[in-house]
Image (spheres, rainbow, N blue to C red):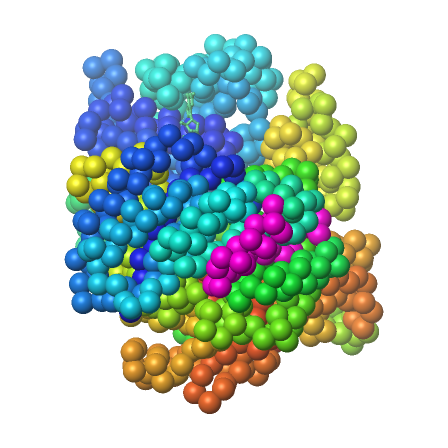
Amino acid sequence: MAGVYIHIPFCKQACHYCDFHFSTSLKKKEEMLLALEKELLMRKEELTGQVVDTIYFGGGTPSVLDTQETDRLIQTVLDHYVVGEDPEITLEANPDDLSSEKLGHFAVSKVNRLSIGVQSFFDEDLRFMNRAHNAEQARATLAMAREQFDNISIDLIYGIPIAEDERWKQNIEIALSYQVPHISSYALTVEPGTALKKFIDKGIVPEVDDEKAEAQFRHLVTTLESAGFLHYELSNFGKPGYFSRNNTAYWQGKTYLGIGPSAHSFNGQQRSWNISNNTLYIKGIQQGRLPAETEILTQRDLYNEYVMTGLRTMWGVSLQRIEQEFGSHFREYLLRQAERHLEDQYLYLDGDTLRVSLKGKFLSDGLAADLFMLPLEKKT
Amino acid sequence: MKHIRNFCIIAHIDHGKSTLADRLLDFTGSVTERDKKEQLLDNMDLERERGITIKSHAIQMEYTYEGEKYILNLIDTPGHVDFSYEVSRSIAACEGALLVVDAAQSIQAQTISNLYLALENDLEIIPVLNKVDLPSANPEEVTDDIVDLLGCDPEDVIPASAKTGIGIGEILKAIIERIPAPKGNVDEPLQALVFDSVYNPFRGVETYFRVINGQISKGQKIKFVATGKNYYADEVGTLKLTQLPRPTIKAGDVGYLITGIKDAREVKVGDTITDADNPTKNPIEGFEDVKPMVFAGIYPVDTEDFEELRSSMEKLQLNDASLVFTPESSAALGFGFRCGFLGMLHMEIIQERLEREFDMTVITTVPNVSYQAFTKKNPDAPITVNNPSDLPDPSTLDRVEEPYIKATIITKADYVGNVMSLCIEKRGQITNQTYLTTERVELNFDMPLAEIVFDFYDRLKTVSRGYASFDYAPIGMRVSKLVRVDILLNAQPVDALSALIHADNAANIGKKMCEKLKELIPRQQFDIPIQAAIGAKIISRETIKALRKDVTAKCYGGDISRKRKLLEKQKKGKKRMRQVGNVEIPQQAFMAVLKLND
Ligand SMILES: Nc1nc2c(ncn2[C@@H]2O[C@H](COP(=O)(O)OP(=O)(O)OP(=O)(O)O)[C@@H](O)[C@H]2O)c(=O)[nH]1
Ligand code: SF4
Ligand SMILES: [Mg+2]
């Protein structure tokens, strides 16, 4: 199974925390769509022999497109790729774009899953993050979407410096009241180069508090788990049967094709990424050339990535798979590196699977780093 | 001999010695266009990168003046105080010195200390006012300063620019006319001064010498007086840009010698070379065994690398005889070496060379000076304390003595107050204050050497806004009230973080050390208490709060490789950390005491 990801690099306005690739000018939208279609044609050989089971419109803000435009792109995939019986076709959407009319159009289009960027049900939080929608729009859109779509995911952000725990709890309650089957929830992360980073550095807004974020995260995990969600990835919760196929592909090392500026592709051995610049991307594609860089992953890289993603998911890191794919010395190395953390109970062994304990969950990056294998650096 | 001139270039750091040497080489046609580069004589990688001279460098030039051909032997010297012994031996090998003074900065501490060395050796001083091309140059005033200092005529000061070439002809003229030709008798027994040595991995140690009397020839059986060892002179020659073998080097001249010696320690700078069968009765005066001033532990980051570290240190010692080390062990760090250095710059250089030339990542512990402890039981027998943990139990102590230095500081009148408060805080006693001009003041202090080691330079720079230069010379041991401040991490003492500190400053420094360590030790999965203690008494404490979160929320397509690379880097960084108990301590933390005021 393989996935196709299509990046729609346009947003109405820039959220303060965001470091995704997008432009706030829609002038090049048509050129971009042509380029995306052309890239899909140019690269179809890359998925030869693979069955596509998920198409994902990410961004940016794909909901700036209308149904005709999304259908054009979907059709291109259907025409030139081998697509499975019942593909998951997701559209990332922002509440301010989803009028009831537009929702209706999408409901009858090929899109069958919505991922709605709610982030918070409170105006203070939304303003703090410079989101384009308000709390009222978030609620209204969600209510309407519920009527048209069964498969809905919403995004929520915790650890917002101005949001107290009580507000976070209410956010979760409200989300649950809409009975969505999937929730992605992110800790507000201060990325370099973002407005948020600048504000924090200048002291204009308070710093993100780890302890608060951790407490909110724990509350989220327990609440959602008791509501029947599975915590299948650090930031992702799904009811059985509703895990995101697209995202799961990333964490399980499956093949995916990334179309559009800044999109990444992976085929099990090599990863490539398109240039993060709309103009240069369009120009390259128009000239029949893919403006991308490629990196071939070594065994060690693949091992490191598997450990890193494995620890974040409910599937953990399978020692058997490590042995099969990388050899027994990788398995031994992994266990040796894990020893200290097993002792301290940040990690635990569940049969032949290495997992992060609840107290280790929020530290899984550091734990993964400790298990990493580095190239030998010594000259002799 | 009438046509030989031996001279060195001395100055404060960065006043342009090596650049002036370049110009002299150009002017005399000693280098081809192809070989030209800036600070040509600074041939070690480290010298070139940092733009400083670490070793003396000698080179011979030929120059025709008024129809006569002269041999000019030039020695470029390092400016930094750590290498002042080496400078003193280079000076002893010459009859004259170019005293270079920066026309913007005027006379600084090393200008004076090097001048005194030159005068002690009766050298003819040629003052060179360098960098006159700088817009900030102040030629009239600085010339006055020089005239005041030397008691010379203003006409004796040669305005020059080592950058643009102004004054180079004048300098050469002065070298020939003012510096006396060497005296010496070719027929006397060989008497040659070793002023430098360089390690060559293929040819062994190359010894640079100045023949005072007699001559040295290829094949001659020679003797090094201080070490008492005999060798055959496999090769002697002249130091041009490359070495030029010659049958004989005679009295008055400078040359190199190769004997097949493989260990730099066998060639001592300042030693006298003589004929093994017909030795001189007068070894050259002024020889000293260089004594290390600063000690620190050097440990491999990975305990398994101890033997590799030993062999690297041994190799390093082959070409740097001033490095001394003995094995030691630390409860926190395992096996390593206690090393002695000429000073802080030397310590940094060794550490850097270990990484660069031997690929050894090391942890250097808090440096300290060499103390002498006397016990009540045996109040006349000194116990050398080169490591805080060697200090005997305080209850058994009669007294502790620590090395003192005479500090010379030259600064602007405006900053005298600041400099004085700093020196007094550093336990200095002012012994002298002289106004060199209305603007510039020379201050002298007697100070404990240990205080120089503990972040003195940086603070001096700060309190004087960069307008202070500093030099020092040892003046012996004095009784002192020292205590050992220990650091506990997670309630475990970490011996490698202990420091010997004057009792009056202990509380303050203990507190600052805790604060600094809190800043330097990365947060870990649990709270880490940091405590400073004297004996059983806790004098300060801090806590490093546990790390609660290190994950980023999203980890999709593009995030994966970015994150992998980030975590790889993080793991690499951790490799430079040392696990003590269950706390990971980064390398810089062991030197934290040195940066307490940053
Ligand atoms: N403008 C100007 N700059 C100069 C002149 N002479 C030297 N410099 C610069 O001053 C700096 C120091 O010069 P060096 O020749 O390395 O000084 P040094 O005295 O040998 O330094 P140490 O060996 O480290 O004590 C370099 O950046 C030179 O380019 C000069 O006449 N004019
Ligand atoms: S809408 Fe999404 S992609 Fe656009 S700026 Fe906001 S967070 Fe970033
Ligand atoms: Mg120099």
Can residue A148 be found in the magenta stretch?
A: yes
Instruction: State which quarter of the image contains the N terminus of chain B.
Output: top left
Q: Residue at x 48, y 13 (%)?
A: B135
- Viewer-proximal residue, B67 or B577? B577
Q: Residue at x 45, y 20 (%)?
A: B130
Quarter-wise, where is residue B244 in the image?
top left
Q: x and y percent of residue A63 in the render? A: 44, 45
The answer to whether residue B328 is above or below residue B293 is: below
Of all residues, the one furthest to the bottom in this rendering is A351
In what quadrant does ligand 1 lie?
A: top left
- Viewer-proximal residue, B310 or B232? B310
Q: x and y percent of residue A20 in the render? A: 45, 46
The answer to whether residue A43 is above or below residue B155 is: below
The answer to whether residue B532 is above or below residue A71 is: below
Q: Kindly tell me whether residue A270 is visible in this rendering.
A: yes
Q: Residue at x 76, y 56 (%)?
A: B511
Can residue A363 be found in the magenta stretch?
A: no
The answer to whether residue B431 is above or below residue B335 is: above
Q: Which residues are magenta?
A: A137-163
Q: Residue at x 72, y 56 (%)?
A: A167
Say whether residue A327 is left or right of residue A213. left
Q: x and y percent of residue A110 in the render? A: 35, 55
Q: Kindly tell me whether residue B207 is visible in this rendering.
A: no
Say whether residue A63 is left or right of residue B438. left
Instruction: State which quarter of the image contains the C terminus of chain B.
Output: top right
Quarter-wise, where is residue B233 in the image?
bottom left
Figure disc tally = 0
- Viewer-proximal residue, B129 or B508? B508
Q: x and y percent of residue B396 in the render? A: 79, 74
